[in-house]
Amino acid sequence: MVISGNDRGNKGEIVRIDRARGRVVVKGVNMHWRHIKKNPKNPQGGRVQREASVHISNVLLFDEKSNRGVRIRHQEKNGKKVRISAKSGSVLEAK
């Protein structure tokens, strides 16, 4: 869930993470036009809309139970490290 900027409140799946730059690409968020030159793969050329990256501090995990973006904490359950919502205390599963 995006918490700031033009796409505030939008939810989407994280497509790519760039840990070195501290940025993430979220599906359907921060869309920008990319101009493509003519080439054998794309003989027409033209404009394509793509997702641009968002700073990782502007994104929170979405908790279905509380229906909002939440901060997380890590805890060990059954010998496995899991993410827990700091607000509701529910375990957040990766999809």
Image: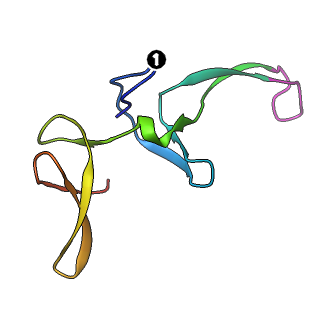
87 magenta-colored? no
Q: Quick one: SS at disc 1?
A: loop
Q: Is residue 55 left or right of residue 83?
A: right
**Residue 10 location in percent, x, y?**
36, 25
Predominant SS of the magenta segment: loop
Q: Count neighbours of disc 1 (C-alpha within 10 A) and say few if under 14, some if 14 to 19, many if 20 or more.
A: few
Where on the picture, by quarter, is residue 60?
top left
**Whether residue 18 is situated above or below residue 81 in the rendered picture:** above
Instruction: Give 41 or 5, whichever is nearer the viewer.
Output: 5
**Residue 3 location in percent, x, y?**
36, 29
Which residue is identified by label 1?
6
Instruction: Give 8 or 38, whichever is nearer the viewer.
Output: 8
Q: Is residue 47 left or right of residue 65?
A: right
**Residue 55 location in percent, x, y?**
52, 38
What is the quadrant of the N terminus in the image? top left
- Magenta range is 36-45
Q: Is residue 61 left or right of residue 55?
A: left
Label total for image: 1
- Residue in the image at 38% along x and 31% along y: 2
- Residue in the image at 31% along x and 56% along y: 94
**Whether residue 36 is situated above or below residue 92 in the rendered picture:** above
Furthest residue in direction bottom, as rendered? 79
**Residue 39 location in percent, x, y?**
89, 31
Figure coloring: rainbow
- Residue in the image at 35% along x and 31% along y: 11
Instruction: Give 80 or 21, whichever is nearer the viewer.
Output: 21
**Whether residue 37 is situated above or below residue 55 in the rendered picture:** above
